[in-house]
Amino acid sequence: MIVTDSSVERLRERFENEIHTYPEHYHEIDVGRIRVEDWSIKRFLIANDNDENMAFDSMIRTYRWRKDFGIHDRTDQSFPMEFWQLSGVEIMQTIDGKHVIIEVLRYQKKFDELQQLQYQFVAHCLEKVDRLAGETGFIALKDLTSAQHHNINFDLIEFQMIVVDHFPVGLQQIWLVNCPWIIRPFLPIVINFLFPKFRQLIRYLQSKNLFDLFDPEQIPKTLGGLRERQLIMDAKPLAYMADELGFNKELVDVIYQFFNLKPPSPIDV
């Protein structure tokens, strides 16, 4: 879709007035981007068929949500090391340069006390890949190898689908890799029922198909490639972050048991 420079400038001017009137609703990072990055405006025009009024309303909803949800308040180190390990989240690039965010489902399970932190983690990872991808958009790859029913957190999937709307025209495709027969019948049905607009984005792949899309060095070893797991620098174990996350020792112990994880050694005082 063609978006004219004049449309972008008109919308930018309208949003400057909005920011001036309600500065408390917008984060300074987003304000800075709106002022200098056309894509921070253009994507809303594309998503709303160049309807400037609808795009303006959508910008208000999204940029207010970003401030309220704290998108810019967290870093990779805001999340426990175990989140990165269990989710398997990494960002790769296809042969033709598309950014792909991979998520491994087989180690994931729903734990109510972690749900809000998981929502924050999802939004943080989407922001991360969206900034890298820019106007070309990104692909979400779900590694379903050996996944079972209990690995599918439908509340988290619903949140992911809702939050994607705050990254308009960012998500280009959803690749479901090695989807087990026990999951394949009902997972797309649920996604299609709740979010039919994503139906056309879903693509089923096997590990072998990835070699047509990625260099082997970009494919994780768990999917048959050569890529070693990339660890997040300075990420701390959950047990070491308990106080800042508001978790007591009893809850931390339960979490480690629930996910069958070995707790780290106590910190020497």
Image (cartoon, rainbow, N blue to C red):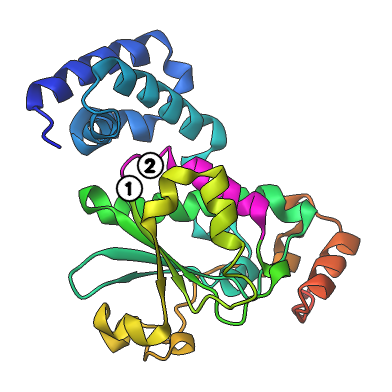
Which quadrant of the figure has residue 235? bottom right
- Is residue 73 at least partly visible in the picture? no
Q: How many marks?
A: 2
SS assignment at label 1: loop
Whether residue 227 is situated above or below residue 174 in the rendered picture: below
Q: Residue at the location (16% across, 25% down)?
A: 8
Q: Which mark is residue 170?
A: 1
In percent of width and height, residue 160 lies at 53, 49
Q: Which mark is residue 247?
A: none
Q: Which mark is residue 167?
A: 2
Residue segment shown in magenta: 153-170
Whether the residues at callouts 2 and 1 have beta carbons within 8 Å, the answer is yes
Which quadrant is the N terminus positioned in?
A: top left
Q: Residue at the location (22% across, 38% down)?
A: 39
Whether residue 166 is situated above or below residue 186 in the rendered picture: above
Q: Amino acid at mark 2?
A: Phe
Q: Amino acid at mark 1?
A: Gly
In percent of width and height, residue 183 lies at 62, 70
In the image, 47 versus 188, the foreground residue is 188
Q: Residue at the location (54% across, 52% down)?
A: 191
Q: Residue at the location (43% across, 12% down)?
A: 22
In the image, 246 versus 50, the foreground residue is 50
- Is residue 98 at least partly visible in the picture? yes
